[in-house]
Image (tube, grey):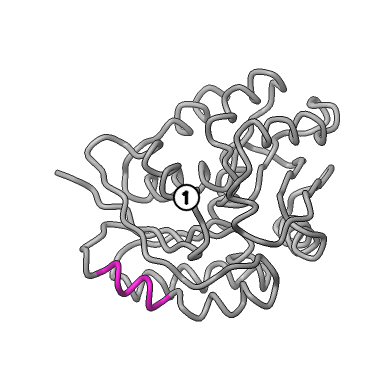
Amino acid sequence: MTTRLGLVVPSSNTTVEPDFRAMAPEESTVHAARMPLEDVTVDDLDEMAGGAERAAELLSHAAVDGIAYACTTGSLLHGTGFDEELEARLSEAAGAPAVATALSVKRALAALDAETVAVVTPYASELNEREREYLVDSGFEVASLDGRGLVANTEIGELTAADAREQVESAVPSAHSVDAVFVSCTNYRTVPALSELEAALDVPVISSNSATMWDLTDRLGLSTSLDTRLAER
């Protein structure tokens, strides 16, 4: 029986769908609905969130089995508590289990027993500080946080996995000083670099998309490559 995975994504995101299709378990399909967003700023992300429930409702027309709000900063924008409310609203709108990227990241880090993390993002400073606050308020120590200063989401989508690998390798302090590395942003093409980075740094490396896919499929009783990596830790 085919499992249908639903995605709610920013309209300018060009990475989530190919990443999810690459990671999707066998006998599953990926279906997306979009919310208007061009620039990754606090105001634009806040405005975008107003379309989330309508997007989830539209995905319910495809009888999806589960849904992911695939936007990192959009799901942590208003801090802890907002993430859980967002999941509940989307689940009700879609009539199916729902996860939001920010909470998925927290769950993945908890599953890895990570307490101290290094964070790498493509964002400008305002969003970086929102992300730092969110992770600290969630009980994690942020050893370092490095951003690229990008605002236009199309520019973020043009970054490659090689760009992600280079940023992580240059930005992460001594690998043995952190429990995990988190590469943030669902539009940052990171998935092809994760295993290579883990081998080089000898610590778990997760991204927004790998954590969201793991969380959604775990909720649905499926498994992905992150399950294997978690089991090996």
- Residue named by callout 1: 16
Q: In this orientation, which residue lies closer to the viewer: 60 or 136?
A: 60
Q: Residue at x 78, y 57 (%)?
A: 132
Q: Quadrant of residue 58?
A: bottom left
Q: Quadrant of the C terminus?
A: top right
Across and down, in percent, residue 225 comes to: 44, 30
Across and down, in percent, residue 226 comes to: 48, 33
* Amino acid under disc 1: Val
Q: Which residues are magenta?
A: 53-60
| Residue 96 falls left or right of residue 107 | left
Q: Quadrant of the N terminus?
A: top left
Q: Residue at x 60, y 34 (%)?
A: 161
Across and down, in percent, residue 29 comes to: 27, 47
Q: SS for tag 1? A: helix
> Quick one: label 1, few (<14), some, or many (20+) residues within 10 Å?
many
Q: Is residue 52 magenta?
A: no
Across and down, in percent, residue 86 comes to: 50, 71
Q: In this orientation, which residue lies closer to the viewer: 93 or 140?
A: 93
Q: In this orientation, which residue lies closer to the viewer: 193 or 172?
A: 193
| Residue 6 falls left or right of residue 164 | left
Where 189 falls versus 79 (above or below)?
above
Q: Residue at x 44, y 46 (%)?
A: 213
Main SS, magenta region, reads helix
